[in-house]
Image: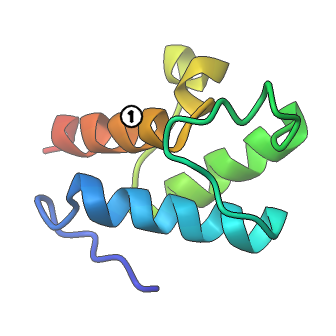
Amino acid sequence: MTISSEPGSHTAETVAQEVQRFLEQRTKQTWDPDTDLFSTGAVSSMFAMELVVHLESTFDVVITGPDLALDNFRTVNAMTAMVLRLRGAQP
């Protein structure tokens, strides 16, 4: 899936779909958007770093400092909200 880097081209739906696609491809299962991926054991801290790289490269965002908190990566919805927030903060 190609994601446009144009501001405003990302909706919660398109971001969530891409995050879901990536998770399904890597874990070979489907995830509810509110499932805590860490408590299920689906995501380790090492895999969380892969998520950071994927989100940064796919959505043209930079995830640093407080945004690297595990809570931002616990669920598809949390990752979607973070990406949308970071996209909105960019000029």
Task: Give the vertical position of 22 relative to 81 (above or below).
Answer: below
35 lies left or right of 46: left
88 lies left or right of 34: left
Residue count near mark 1 (Cα–Cα under 10 Å), binned few <14, some 14–19, many ≥20? some
Image coordinates of residue 75 in percent, x first then y, are 56, 36
User: In the rendered image, which quarter contains the C terminus?
Assistant: top left
Q: Residue at x 27, y 43 (%)?
A: 84
Q: Residue at x 58, y 19 (%)?
A: 71
Task: Give the vertical position of 88 relative to 59 (above or below).
Answer: above
Task: Give the vertical position of 11 relative to 76 (above or below).
Answer: below
55 lies left or right of 60: right
Q: How many callouts does the rendering have?
A: 1
Q: Residue at x 22, y 62 (%)?
A: 10
Quadrant in the picture for residue 14: bottom left
Quadrant in the picture for residue 20: bottom right
Residue 34 seen in this snapshot: yes
What is the secondary structure assignment of the residue under circle 1? helix
Image coordinates of residue 27 in percent, x first then y, are 82, 62
Image coordinates of residue 25 in percent, x first then y, are 73, 74
Task: Give the residue type that dot 1 points to.
Answer: Met
**Which residue has dot 1 on it?**
82
Q: Residue at x 60, y 24 (%)?
A: 68
Image coordinates of residue 85 in percent, x first then y, are 26, 34
Task: Give the vertical position of 18 relative to 35 (above or below).
Answer: below
Residue 57 seen in this snapshot: no
Residue placed farthest to the bottom in the image? 1
6 lies left or right of 36: left
